[in-house]
Image: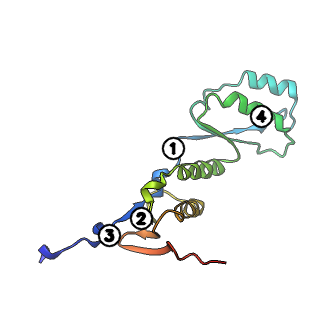
Amino acid sequence: MLDGFVNKVSESGIITLDLEDFYPKGKTVVFDMKDHLFMGLILKEKDFREKMKHLDLSNYKGNNIALTCTADAVIPVWAYMLVASYLEPIVTEIFFGDVDFVHKTLFLQNIAKINLVTYQNQRVVIKGCGELAISEAAYVAITALLMPVAKSIMYGEPCSTVPIYKNGTKKKL
């Protein structure tokens, strides 16, 4: 009889948190210093400054920027700062590093902005499967963030979870 069917998952009060909701938005564009060096290896200050003054910024506007140098060149710190000063006003975010670093940093920033009041004394399941690849760093960050407030943390789906943490189960040293 279907009259006696009870959805225990929906009645359990478990909150599902999907990390895909915090996945970084927008495109990341690489700004490679080597493309602006003499012979791809040498930074000539006067030439470099001139290139920066005439840099076509349209490719960077509104995007996240991965500022890097893929050549084995010695780049003075001020040169990275100069590039950042030209790009910062028109880009969404700028970071020193590769695309993967930018993605991971933005992801962790998004997770850090979570309103923890929603999870206060709640049983939380961190969704385990989805369409997007979620790094281990994101799972570690959300666990550390929720531990002080959540009643319990689980991994997986509400119908099949792996227990991770239960409030009051911390071992004292």
Mark toward the viewer: 2 or 4: 2
The amino acid beneath tag 3 is Ser
Earlier in the chain: of badge 4 and badge 3, it is 3
Mark 4 residue crowding within 10 angstroms, few (<14) / some (14–19) / many (20+): few
Does dot 3 land on a helix, a strand or a loop? loop
Does dot 1 land on a helix, a strand or a loop? loop
12 to 62, vertically: above or below: below
> What numbered label is drawn on residue 12?
3
Which part of the image, by quadrant, shows the C terminus?
bottom right
Mark 2 = which residue? 122
Earlier in the chain: of badge 4 and badge 1, it is 1
Q: Nearer the viewer, residue 94 or 54?
A: 94
Mark 1 = which residue? 25
What separation in Å lies between label 3 and label 2 (alpha carbons)?
11 Å
What separation in Å lies between label 2 and label 1 (alpha carbons)?
28 Å
What separation in Å lies between label 1 and label 3 (alpha carbons)?
32 Å
The amino acid beneath tag 1 is Lys
